[in-house]
């Protein structure tokens, strides 16, 4: 499972992006919605309904968590009963699509459905699996534009996403921790990236150990916030259309420090804290201001990408850790399907 429950990005609420310097009597959540896209981070349909989102995303870890709840177990049992005898990977995809269709009956926009993380280093297999997911959605009457295929931001995953985008299948690149991953995703013209804030923060805090000073690493100085800000500014400077969705938050300060980002995915717990707060909220990221920055334009091929990623110990470790965790949960989901 995704190591941090708060990182499972599930719902995306699109609202007008307009700058605001104060709340004008609104709570922080409503103030944030004035200039960024708020994402409710939960795999529970009931929570999706509460937050009335525009879009949603799923992955095998979210499905695993959901099907262990009595109210969702029937979706797994019904899928197995209907397609018993089919290959296990097909059953998995059909279950993911079943959940996706249920979510799309609630949200008016898009759903993200993840390709098996065990294919993270196989571009061809990723494309094939993604195409099957799209076909399964289309068989249920879902238009291709309502689905984003979620793929790990490995070199192979990014190349698979580039091919899918050329075919009109839009993608969401996840497990993104480094600037080189973001640059390569921009080159691939993917629809959306999900750079993680909390896991970057976790790594630097653990690495620093007793020398970590929390007060020196909060809000705009948070290493995860710095990473997403760098990516946002680079994309806006060079007119890269890929959407930036900050993910994996540990506290409200990380969220408010990224106000103005294209999208932010926030857990129900932190959404509740924002809703309960009347503290002033200012727009922290500014696309127009980013265009005036002096930044070098970068380009990565496979060799330079792999080297840049290798030189980033945090990103290398967190990417590998994230893939392993998704693979573990995919295996657990396999066992549940086999036992049903």
Image (cartoon, helix red, strand yellow):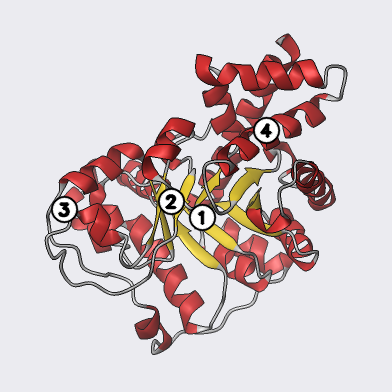
Q: Is residue 234 above or below residue 269?
A: below
Confirm whether residue 209 shows in the render: no
Residue beneath disc 2: 247
Place of residue 288 in the rendered image (x, y in percent of width and height, measured from the top left): 38, 84
Q: How far apart are marks 1 and 3 (CA)?
A: 26 Å
Q: How far apart are marks 2 and 4 (CA)?
A: 25 Å
Q: How far apart are marks 4 and 3 (CA)?
A: 45 Å
Q: Can you tell which mark lies on residue 303?
A: none
Label located before the other in sequence (4 or 3): 4
Of the two numbered discs 2 and 3 in the rendering, the one whose residue sits closer to the viewer: 2
Label located before the other in sequence (2 or 3): 3
> Are there few (<14), some (14-19), or many (20+) residues within 10 Å of tag 2?
many
Horizontal relation, residue 130 to residue 297: left or right: right
Q: How far apart are marks 2 and 1 (CA)?
A: 6 Å
Residue beneath disc 3: 215
Residue 81 image-quadrant placement: top right
Q: How far apart are marks 2 and 3 (CA)?
A: 22 Å
Of the two numbered discs 1 and 4 in the rendering, the one whose residue sits closer to the viewer: 4
Horizontal relation, residue 218 to residue 306: left or right: left
Of the two numbered discs 2 and 4 in the rendering, the one whose residue sits closer to the viewer: 4
Label located before the other in sequence (1 or 4): 4
Q: In which quarter of the image is the C terminus?
A: top right
Tag 2–tag 3 contact (CB < 8 Å): no
Q: Is mark 1 on a helix, strand or loop?
A: strand
| Front residue of 180 and 339 | 339
Of the two numbered discs 1 and 3 in the rendering, the one whose residue sits closer to the viewer: 1
Q: Is residue 43 above or below residue 320?
A: above
Of the two numbered discs 4 and 3 in the rendering, the one whose residue sits closer to the viewer: 4
Residue beneath disc 1: 194
Residue beneath disc 4: 98
């Amino acid at each position: 499972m995704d190591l941090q429950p708060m990182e499972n990005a599930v719902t995306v609420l699109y609202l007008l992006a307009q700058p605001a310097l104060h709340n004008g009597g609104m709570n922080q959540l409503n103030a944030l919605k004035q200039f960024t896209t708020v994402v409710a981070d939960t795999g529970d349909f009931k929570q999706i309904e509460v937050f009335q989102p525009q879009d949603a995303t799923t992955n095998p870890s979210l499905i695993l968590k959901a099907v262990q709840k009595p109210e969702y177990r029937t979706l797994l049992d019904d899928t197995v009963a209907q397609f018993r005898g089919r290959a296990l990977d097909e059953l998995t995809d059909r279950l993911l699509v079943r959940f996706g269709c249920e979510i799309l009956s609630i949200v008016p926009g898009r759903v993200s459905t993840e390709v098996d993380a065990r294919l993270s280093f196989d571009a061809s297999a990723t494309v094939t699996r993604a195409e099957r997911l799209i076909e399964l959605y289309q068989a249920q009457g879902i238009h291709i534009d309502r689905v984003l295929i979620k793929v790990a931001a490995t070199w192979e995953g990014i190349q698979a996403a580039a091919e899918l985008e050329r075919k009109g299948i839009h993608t969401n690149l996840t497990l993104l921790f480094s600037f080189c991953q973001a640059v390569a995703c921009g080159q691939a013209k993917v629809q959306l990236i999900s750079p993680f804030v909390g896991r970057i923060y976790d790594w630097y805090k653990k690495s620093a150990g007793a020398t970590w000073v929390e007060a020196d690493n909060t809000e705009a100085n948070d290493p995860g916030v710095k990473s997403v800000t760098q990516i946002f500014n680079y994309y806006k400077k060079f007119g890269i259309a890929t959407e930036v969705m900050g993910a994996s938050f540990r506290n409200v300060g990380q969220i408010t420090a990224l106000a103005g980002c294209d999208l932010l995915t926030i857990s129900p717990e932190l959404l509740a804290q924002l809703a309960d707060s009347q503290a002033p909220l200012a727009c922290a990221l500014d696309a127009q201001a980013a265009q005036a920055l002096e930044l070098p334009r970068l380009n990565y091929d496979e060799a330079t990408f792999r080297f840049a990623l290798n030189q980033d110990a945090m990103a290398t470790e967190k990417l590998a850790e994230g893939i392993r965790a998704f693979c573990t949960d995919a295996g657990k989901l396999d066992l549940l399907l086999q036992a049903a």
